[in-house]
Amino acid sequence: MGSAPAQTMRAQQYDARDNKLHLNEIPIPSPREHELLIKIACASLCHSDVMLFEPNEQGLILGKNPVTIGHEATGYVAATGSGEVASKFKKGDPVGFICAIDCCFDCYACKNVHNAWCETGKTKMQGFSEDGYFAEYAVIDAREAMVLPESLDPKSSAPLFCAGVTAYHGIADCELAPGSWVAVVGCGGLGHMGIQYAKAMGYKVIGIDITEAAIEEAKNCGADHAFNSVEDKEYQKKITDLTGGGVHAAVNFTASKKSYDDCPAIVKPGVGMIMVVGIPRAPLQFNALDIALGRYRVKGSNNGTCYNMKAAIEFSAKHNIKPHMTSFKLEEVPKMIELMNSHKAQGRMGVVFD
């Protein structure tokens, strides 16, 4: 007789009682009618995962405790729920997905803004208010999933389903003409992908970061110029000289408030934009007179819904845009967090499952 199917799995869970991660053995979940059970192939670390361990003023909500962290993954369908939306997938399908659950997916906010603002007020984000993806299995809403294009490998494509979608729309939502100047502020896990998207869209790109490793990553990803904003005290003047008065958009992928404070100096007056993507711990401050008199605009970018996910993934496949990812084991997630906090990581870091 064959062995009975596994009933439990390993998961990296955050516990607010000691503000630490624990590698726990927990039950494998069962999909509800509209859900898929996914055997995780790859789960990657996002900076917002690390925000669980930090005090912040940006409305990050923890639900259940302990909670499995991680909201960026790809995998294979292991089982489907009984409902119509789940039946569109079959066992073994390679899939990617995003993390909002329990929203309606049908109201104006869900379709046009973000599931976080669903009119039901019931939205949960996996990895924060509900179990996420640093585990051997996860259940996800079938409406948030898509079968991967043939050229994308489930064992390396996880970063596309947060970093990729976020970076793509961070650039695309600037709505610039080809040949425009774009500054990518922060060239790490998000920014190294933003540079690739910006180049593929026909923009001239300047990378800005505070570490030499990230500057090298920016160049490797195709940035036309790259500046270390700590080492080069003249970087803002150099950028305005290079671009004839400033960039058309500064897309900020960092969690640094100072980097936002520094953006107005490199944006072209009257036509420039500051695109807010990264979320610092403290609220941002912009000069009201600058905005009222049209010195620059401030805009946010939708970081991913089931309605705009597919365009980003298909663009990535078409233009061969892939995350630069370092692989780890599930028990090494604390090491990944340490590397992210110390700014020693290049690109993205992910757990690859057997």
Image (tube, rainbow, N blue to C red):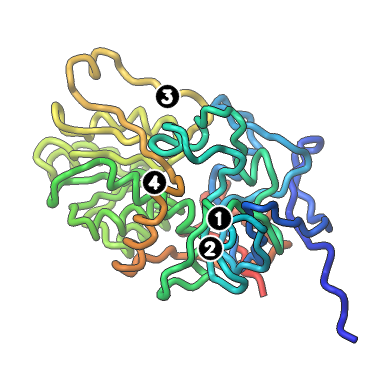
What amino acid is at disc 3? Leu
Q: Amino acid at mark 2?
A: Lys
Residue that label 1 marks = 85
**Which percent across, then down, holds residue 155?**
55, 71
Label located before the other in sequence (4 or 2): 2
Upstream in sequence: badge 3 or badge 2: 2
**Visible in this render: residue 238?**
yes
Give the label on residue 186, or none.
Answer: 4
Residue at 58% x, 28% y is 121
* Residues tagged 4 and 1 counted as in contact (Cβ below 8 A): no
Which residue is more in the foreground, 178 or 131? 131
Find numbered disc 4 in the image and state the secondary structure of the residue it sits on. Answer: loop
Question: Residue pushed farthest right?
Answer: 1
Q: Amino acid at mark 4?
A: Gly
User: Which sits earlier in the primary sequence, circle 3 or circle 4?
Assistant: 4
Residue at the bottom extreme of this rendering: 1
Compared to residue 341, the image places residue 104 above or below, namely above
Q: Where does label 2 land, which residue?
A: 88
* Residue 13 vs residue 114, the one in the foreground: 114
Residue to which mark 3 is pinned: 284
* Separation (CA) of disc 4 from disc 1: 38 Å
Between residues 50 and 147, which one lies in front from this camera angle?
147
Q: Are marks 1 and 2 in contact (CB under 8 Å)?
A: yes
